[in-house]
Every structure is written in structure tokens, then in C-alpha cells.
Amino acid sequence: MLSTDLRNNVLVVRVEEKRIDASRAPAFKDEMTRCIEAGQNQLVLDLSRVDFIDSSGLGALVSCLKRLGPRGSLAVAGATGAVSRLFTLTRMDRVFALHPDVDTAVEQLSA
Amino acid sequence: MVSSISLSIDSDLDKVSLLARAVRALCEDLLSPEDQDAVELSLVEAINNVIKHGYHGERGKDVQVAVGLQADQVVIEIIDHAPPMPTQVLDKPSEDTFTFDETDIANIPEGGMGLALIRMNMDEVEYHSSESENRLRMIKRIAART
């Protein structure tokens, strides 16, 4: 469900599905964990194709952040509508840096 | 205008999005896109809770959803036959769920957010358990058109 692209030492991970819900959260978490365990510690998660995330999806994202630990960073790009509002509502916008698009996020992380 | 419809799925997480999209489509003419999002998220969270916690992920159990479209509100009831939600879950104030310290990464919640999200997204939420069933009733009021 993910595709990856390395840009300026930042791994851009794009979610290729429209929903990250309870049925997809375990697969999402597994694929993200593989990226992290491959040694990537600067990640941008591109959510521009996602139109729905539930609390299971959000929990999987938090779990990835914990896995990454203090050595890394996980930024979010392209969240709009209901996805963006979920981050605000749950105050997860304080936990994940939200960027309007991938370019901005990569620029910030590689600066 | 009052109309109602009952939908049901098997207790399978793969089927929740079908129901969510169906209910969202039913509300399309009545609610703003933001309110449709709120209803869709609340419905998904409620059904996930039933499947994951009520039925412990076991398939082949029934989850029913009754949708009532009224002049001033949308009423959604989720009916299941699992053991009822524990009172300590129901009594936990919603605002506590999201008052974590964002600098303390280890203690940021990964779960237990569903009911709090439902309460934040719907105008009224009630939970009733009887010997035969549990019923979560959620209401979204229709904003007056100006």
C-alpha cells in the first residue's frame, strides 16, 4: 500500500490507498516499520491520496513514531479535509509536523 | 420528511468501509461535507469498537446500523449482541484522551480514542444495553440553511 522515493536523504513514503482504517492499519504499520528498520530516520509520509483515516490508522502512525525514536523524524505532507481535521481534533498536529506538500516537507527535513 | 433504513454487515473489519460509504451517501443531501466526515468517522469508530472489543475480532457476528433521516437531524444507531462496553470506558471523560504531553512520545496514545472521537464529532451520544442487545445512538443535527 506504500511507495517510496529517496530525496535528499529523506525517504518519501506515499500511501497509495484512499483509506487507512482498522482493516488496513496493520499492513500500513508493517510496511512503515520495514522502512524504518532499513535504517531510514528522516521520513515524510505523503497522505495526499488518502481521504479517510480512523483512530486505528492514526494509532499506527504514532506507533511508527515511537519505533523511529528520538534519532529520527516523521513529517506528514498533503493531508487535507477529514484527514487534516483528524490531526487537529486529536491534537496530533502537535506531534507530527504537517506540511502542505512533499516538497516543503523534504526541504524542511533536509535543511 | 422522515425516512429510515437498516443495514447490516458481518463482523469483519474489511466490510466497515462499505457501510461507511453507504451511510455517507445517505447523508449527502442533508449534511455539509464536514458533517458527513464527522458522521463517517463516528460510524467507523463505533463499528470498529464493536468488532475489535465487543466480538474480539471474531467474524460471523452481526453488526446492524439503523439510519434515520429526519427534518432536523440524522440519527444513527449501531446495534450489536456482544458483551456491553465496560462502564469505566463509558465514564472516561473524552477530553482526557487528547490531553497528552506531546514531548513525552512514549505516552502518546495509540488506541482508546474511538469513543472520544465519536463524542467530539456527534451532537448526542447515548449507549443502552439490555439483555438482548447493545445500542449506541448517535445524533447529528442538520444545520439550518441560511
Image (spheres, rainbow, N blue to C red):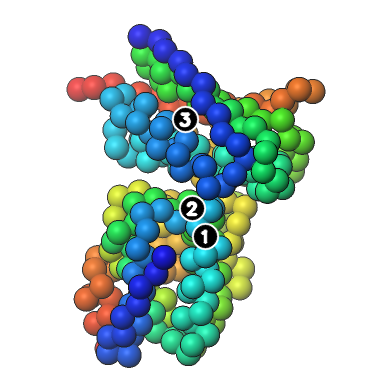
Q: Is residue B76 above or below residue A60?
A: above
Q: Secondary structure at mark 2?
A: loop
- Please give the name of the residue rendered at 62% of the width and 52% of the height, measured from the top-left corner: B112
Name the residue furthest right: B131
Q: With B53 as the anchor, is B8 left or right in this view?
A: left
Q: Between residues A111 and B100, which one lies in front from this camera angle? A: A111
Q: Judge whether residue A12 can be spotted in this image.
A: yes
The alpha-carbon separation of the residues under discs 1 and 2 comes to: 6 Å
Residue wearing tag 1: A25
Residue B123 numbered mark, or none: 3
Q: Is residue B7 above or below residue A6?
A: above
| Residue B71, picture quadrant | top left
Q: In which quadrant of the rendered image does the C terminus of chain B lie?
A: top left
Q: Secondary structure at mark 3?
A: loop
- Please give the name of the residue rendered at 49% of the width and 88% of the height, measured from the top-left corner: A38
Subunit of mark 3?
B
Q: Position of residue B106 (x, y in %)?
A: 61, 73
Question: At label 2, which amino acid type do we have?
Answer: Asp
Graded by Cα atoms within 10 Å as few (under 14), some (14 to 19) or many (20 or more), the crowding at tag 2 reads many
Q: Between residues B146 and B50, which one lies in front from this camera angle? A: B50
Q: Position of residue B67 (x, y in %)?
A: 48, 22
Q: With B63 as the anchor, is A90 left or right in this view?
A: left
Q: Position of residue B133 (x, y in %)?
A: 72, 25
Residue wearing tag 2: A21
- Please give the name of the residue rendered at 35% of the width and 23% of the height, measured from the top-left corner: B142
The alpha-carbon separation of the residues under discs 1 and 3 comes to: 28 Å
Question: At label 3, which amino acid type do we have?
Answer: Asp
Question: At label 1, which amino acid type do we have?
Answer: Ala
Assess whether mark 2 and mark 1 are in contact (beta carbons under 8 angstroms).
yes
Q: Is residue B125 above or below residue B105?
A: above
Graded by Cα atoms within 10 Å as few (under 14), some (14 to 19) or many (20 or more), the crowding at tag 1 reads many
